[in-house]
Image (cartoon, rainbow, N blue to C red):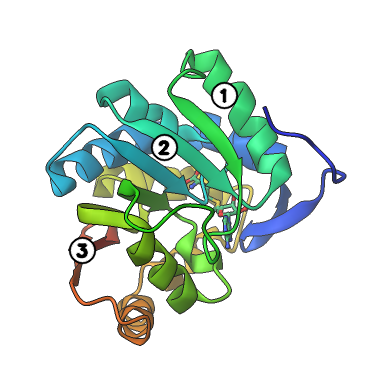
Amino acid sequence: MVLIVNKPGTNRWNGKKRSASEFNEIARKIFAPVYPVVARQAVECCGFDRGFCIDAGCGPGHLAIALAGISGFTIDALDMSLDMLACAEENIRGAGFNGRIRTVHGDVQDLPYDDCSVDLVVSRGSVFFWNAPDRAFAEIYRVIKPGGRTFIGGGFGTPELKASITAKMRSSDLSFEENIRGNLSTEKEMELVNCLENARVPDFETVRDAAGFWIVMRK
Ligand code: SAM
């Protein structure tokens, strides 16, 4: 249960200003096929499918829902936007996962979890909006357990999905393609690697595919 204390607002989720419910609609109608693919990639990459997971910057919760559908994780869907969490609550209830996924209002740069308490942190399309990624990376590394993993970045699952989503978004958001190109660029990846080094994360790699890239930390 999330208490709504602020008025619905708009934010720049991807270049264009959108409300949480507008983003949710786009996620449901256009991005929907991406989440199950990314969820599977996360499970394959981390090598386990049980334990406690955080979806950091979950938005309307679609990745958390997809992950719950293919794994035994108990999941906290965490976001700093109460409007996004209200959408997530509704989607999680609709998918029948309210017993396995909890919504949490929080900032990834100041995580409300004990040291070494989390098995997996997943995050899709949120890292590009973090004010201080180095602080967030230090926090994430602090909370994962020994043996824990992360799957943090941006991606569309497959090149085909990326192409079809880009084509669909073109009609409503002229800046979408350019923003995606910037977010998924080698320059952005290097910038984030620099932040990981500043955060003194000792063991990480970036995994790049034709539809995005992911930061995999190991502890
Ligand atoms: N992960 C979702 C998805 O793929 O559909 C949502 C992506 S949306 C583009 C980015 C999300 O990151 C927003 O819901 C925003 O509120 C959240 N966010 C940005 N900065 C954050 C922070 N510091 N802590 C927690 N959430 C954050």
Which mark is first along the chain, 1 or 2?
A: 2
Horizontally, residue 72 falls left or right of residue 19, namely left
Rendered residue at 37%/80% (across/down): 199
Helix, strand or loop for disc 3? strand
- Which residue is painted at 43% across and 23% down in the image? 100
Residue 23, compared with residue 150, is above or below; it is above
Q: Is residue 73 above or below residue 47?
A: above
Query: Which amino acid, mark 1?
Result: Asn
User: Which structural element holds mark 2?
Assistant: helix
Residue 148, percent across and down?
22, 52
Give the residue number, with chain letter if any, for mark 3. 208
For label 1, the residue is 91
Crowdedness near tag 2: few (<14), some (14–19) or many (≥20) residues, C-alpha within 10 Å: many
Q: Nearer the viewer, residue 208 or 47?
A: 47
Q: Quadrant of the N terminus?
A: top right
| First in sequence: mark 3 vs mark 1 | 1
Decide if residue 13 is in sight here. Answer: yes
Q: CA distance from mark 3 to mark 1?
A: 30 Å
* Amino acid on which the number 2 mark rests in the picture: Leu
